[in-house]
Image: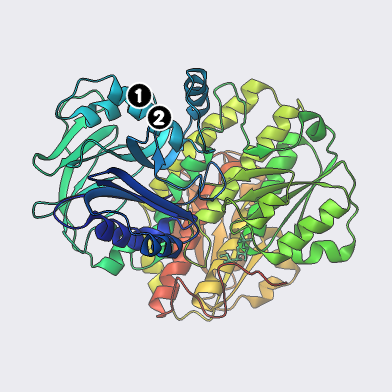
Amino acid sequence: MCGIVGYVGPQQALDVVVEGLRRLEYRGYDSAGVALVTADGLATDKRAGKLANLDKALAENPPPPATSGIGHTRWATHGAPNDVNAHPHLSRGGEVALVHNGIIENFAELRDELERSGTELVSETDTEVAAHLLQRAYDALPAGQGRLAEAMREVCRRLEGAFTLVAVHRDEPDTVVGARRNSPLVAGVGTAEFFLASDVAAFIAHTREALELGEDQVVEIDRERGITVTGFDGRPAQAREYHVDWDASAAEKGGYAWFMLKEIAEQPAAVADTLRGRLTDGGEIVLDEVRLSDEDLRDVDKIFVIACGTAYHAGLVAKYAIEHWTRIPCEVELASEFRYRAPVLTRSTLVVAISQSGETMDTLQAIRHARGQRARVLSICNTNGSTMPRESDAVLYTRAGPEIAVASTKGYLTQLAACYLVGLYLARVRGVMYGDEVSAIVEQLRRTPRLIERTLARMDAVRALGRDLATAPTVLFLGRHVGYPVALEGALKLKELAYIHAEGFAGGELKHGPIALIDDGTPVVVVVPSPRGRNVLHGKVVSNIQEVRARGARMIVVAEDGDTAVEPYADEVIRVPQVPTLLAPLVTSVPLQVLACAIADARGNDVDQPRNLAKSVTVE
Ligand code: AGP
C-alpha cells in the first residue's frame, strides 16, 4: 500500500505534492520521491526512508519551479526499499515519470520483452516496467491533446494485477494522468486546480470536492480542460462525485475514528493482495524469495512455527492446515521460549517465522538460533526490507500494507492467508497433494476476501454488543480445532485494547478447571466449528455451550450461516458466512476484532495506541 499524489494548478507543485505525501505517509514510509514538470524537463528526486529524507534532499538541492507534478511514498513489495527502487520511476529517455501503488502480476514477462528490445532497466521494481511501456506507447502516438492519456490506456490494457498508476510527461506541463485497477485513486476538484491521490487525505486541505475513480478507468487532469475520465477502452466513463466531510486528520484514517477500524475494513483487500499473483490456475503456488530448492523442501521432516502474540495465534491456525495438507509434524512455539528449551533441530527441520514487523527481537533471536543449528528458515513477514527476511532462507511477504494500529488485524489475517499458501506449497512440492486438490483449495481461498467483506457488513450488532460489555470485568473465549487459536486471539485483542481480563480456552478443556470461573452473567464467546465439516466437533461445542450456560453464563456464539443447532443455547448469535473448516479463522476472527475494538472505544481507551504496548517489540 503506497501513497500517491498528482497536481496541476497555479500553486508550486512541489509544495502541494510534498504536503500531500506527508498526509499519506502512514500508507508507506520505505521511501519517497517527486517528479515535477519544469521548463527544463522533468525534475525528480527520490530517497529511501521516511519523507524527511526527501525533504532534506530537496532543501539542499531545490528543483526549478513547476506547477504540475507527482509524488509517492512507498511500502515496498517488489524490490528492497532503497533509492533506486523508490518512485517515481523514469522511462529510458527520462521523458516520462510514473508512480505506482499495487502489484503488476505480469511484470516479469513485460520486463523480458523490454530487455529483449534493448531497454535497460535499473531497478528491481514492477513499476519501472510500466514507465518504459508508457513512454514507448506515447512515442508511437501522434502529437495532440490526450496523448498521454491514450498511452496510459494502451499500457493498462496490457497489465495484470492491482495497480494505481499516475504519470507526467516532460512535454505536457498542463497534464497529469492516472489509472486504476483493484487499487484506490481519487481526484480532487479545486478552483482552477486538480489533484490525484490514493486517498483524499492528500488534498483535503485544498478542496473537499472529490471524484472516486472506478475499476479500469483512466483519468486525465488538465489545467485548461479539467478532468476527463474514460475506460481502458477509451470510452467516456462516469466517476462518482462526492463531498468529503472529514477533517484532514480524520482523512488519514479514511474517515474512521481509529486506524484499527480502517485496517479491519482493509482486510478483504489485504487478503486479496496477499493471495494475488501467488495462486496459479494450475494449483502452483508462487512464493517470493525462496532460496530453498524443492529438494530442500522435500527433505523437511519437521516444522516449527515460531512467533509472538497475534502472530503466534496465526501460527497455531497454520499448524492445523500444514499438518492436514503436508502430513509433516508441525509444532508451534512462542519465539521467546523456543531457543531456551534447546529444541531438536536438524537440516531437515523447517522453521517458519511469522512476524508483521520483521523486527520482533524474540522471533529474530529464535531465527538466529535455528539457523545456528542448521535448520532452514522461511519467514512470513509484512515489512519488506526488515531484518527477519534478510536472515531467512525463504520469504513470503504478506501484503497488508503498513499496519499503524498497535493491535494487529490485517497483519494477522494476511498471516493466515500466507500460512495457507505455505502449507499448500509444501504439500504440492512434496507431492502429497495433487494439482487438482491444491487448485480446489486455491479456489476456496480466492473466495475468502468476499466472505470477509460480507462478515464486515454484519458488524452493527457486534458493535452494540461491545458497548453493552464495556463494563464486564472479564470475558472468556472458547473454541475447538482451528477455533481454539481464534479464541486465544479474541482474548488477546480484548486484553490489549480494553484492558479487561480475558482468557481463551480449548472448549474441551473447560470442564478440567476453567469452568469454575463461570459466574452468573459471565460473558462467554464461543467460536463454533462448522456442522458441515467435522460435525462430531460441532456437537461437542454445542455441549460446551450448554455446560456453560447451565452455570449462568451469557453465551455469545459465533456460528456460520444456517447453523440453527446453537440458537436454543445462545444469548447472542454472531453469524459468519460458511467457509471450509481450515479457512474459517479468516472470517471467525473478524467479529472478535470488532468486539474488542468496540469495548475499548466504549471504555474511552486509545484504540490505536493501547497503554504499555508498542507496535514492534525490538527488545527481548
Ligand atoms: C498483536 O495485536 C500485538 N500487537 C502483538 O501481539 C504482536 O502480534 C506481536 O508483538 C508480534 O509482532 P510481529 O508480528 O511484528 O512480530
Toward the viewer: 282 or 121?
121
Residue at the farthest front position: 40
**Which amino acid is tagged 1?**
Arg
Residue bearing mark 1:
136
Q: Residue at x 15, y 26 (%)?
A: 144
Image coords of residue 527 (percent x, y): 56, 56
Q: Secondary structure at mark 1?
A: helix
Instruction: Tell me which image quadrant ligand 1 sits in.
Output: bottom right
Answer with the quarter of the image where residue 394 lies: top right
In-front residue for pair 347/603: 347
Q: Position of residue 193 (x, y in %)?
A: 13, 51
Dividing the picture into quarters, in which one does residue 28 lie?
bottom left
Residue at point 78%, 36% (across, down): 327
The quadrant of the rendering that contains the C terminus is bottom right
Left or right, 316 with reference to 33: right
Q: Residues within 10 Å of mark 1 (few under 14, many from 20)?
A: some
Q: Position of residue 608 (x, y in %)?
A: 45, 70
The residue that mark 2 highlights is: 132
Please tell me whether residue 365 is drawn above or below residue 392 in the rendered image.
below
Judge by depth and name the residue closer to the eye, 554 or 462. 462
- Above or below, comparing residue 65 to residue 300 in the picture: below
Residue 532's x, y, as percent?
Answer: 57, 38
Query: Which of the pair 556/229 is nearer the observer?
Result: 229
Q: Is residue 586 above or below residue 486?
A: above
Which three-letter amino acid code belongs to the residue tagged 2? His
Q: Are marks 1 and 2 in contact (CB under 8 Å)?
A: yes
In space, the residues marked 1 and 2 are separated at their CA atoms by 6 Å
Q: Which mark is residue 159?
A: none
Q: Does any portion of residue 73 appear in the rendered image?
A: no
What element does badge 2 sit on?
helix
